[in-house]
Image (spheres, rainbow, N blue to C red):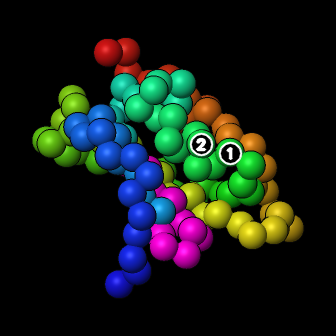
């Protein structure tokens, strides 16, 4: 099992953890959380200045999250720019998922 570091934990709104080696970041957030929200700030700060690829993104039912749903995204963090499509600056959560749910 890989150890992880908590980047953000404001349940039932958002939780984000990075693997100890810093290679992966998982963000688990309520659908009404926008990247511009204060609760998303630790994730923005963690990704700032990093090259990364969004590997997966999905919505799941979760009674413990606000509005009974969560969006989960796995990011792969690159040590160097890879030879394939990736992000070298933060894209918005809204671009990835479409508009967030108004709260």
Residue 80 located left or right of residue 75: right
Image-quadrant location for residue 86: bottom right
| Quadrant where the N terminus is found in the figure | bottom left
Q: How far from the left and from the top, in percent, is residue 29? A: 36, 41
Residue 21: % across, % down: 55, 75
Task: State whether residue 44 appears in this view.
Answer: yes
Bounds of the magenta segment: 19-28
* Residue at 64% from the left image edge and 63% from the top image edge: 77
User: Looking at the image, is 20 positioned above or below residue 73?
Assistant: below
Task: Say if mark 1 contacts mark 2, CB within 8 Å.
Answer: yes
Q: Secondary structure at mark 2?
A: helix
The crowding category of the residue bearing disc 2, from other C-alpha atoms within 10 Å (few below 14, some 14 to 19, many at least 20), is: few
Which residue matches tag 1? 48
Q: Residue at x 40, y 69 (%)?
A: 4
Residue linked to disc 2: 45
Which numbered marker is on residue 82? none
| Picture quarter with the C terminus | top left
């Amino acid at each position: 099992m890989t150890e992880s570091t908590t980047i953000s934990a404001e349940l039932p709104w958002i939780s984000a953890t990075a693997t100890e080696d810093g290679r992966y970041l998982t963000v688990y957030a309520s659908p009404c959380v926008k990247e511009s929200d204060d609760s998303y700030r630790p994730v923005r700060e963690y990704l700032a200045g990093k090259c990364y690829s969004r590997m997966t993104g999905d919505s799941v039912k979760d009674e413990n999250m606000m509005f009974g749903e969560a969006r989960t995204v796995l990011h792969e963090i690159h040590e160097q720019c890879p030879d394939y499509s990736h992000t070298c600056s933060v894209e918005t959560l809204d671009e990835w998922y479409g508009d967030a749910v108004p709260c």
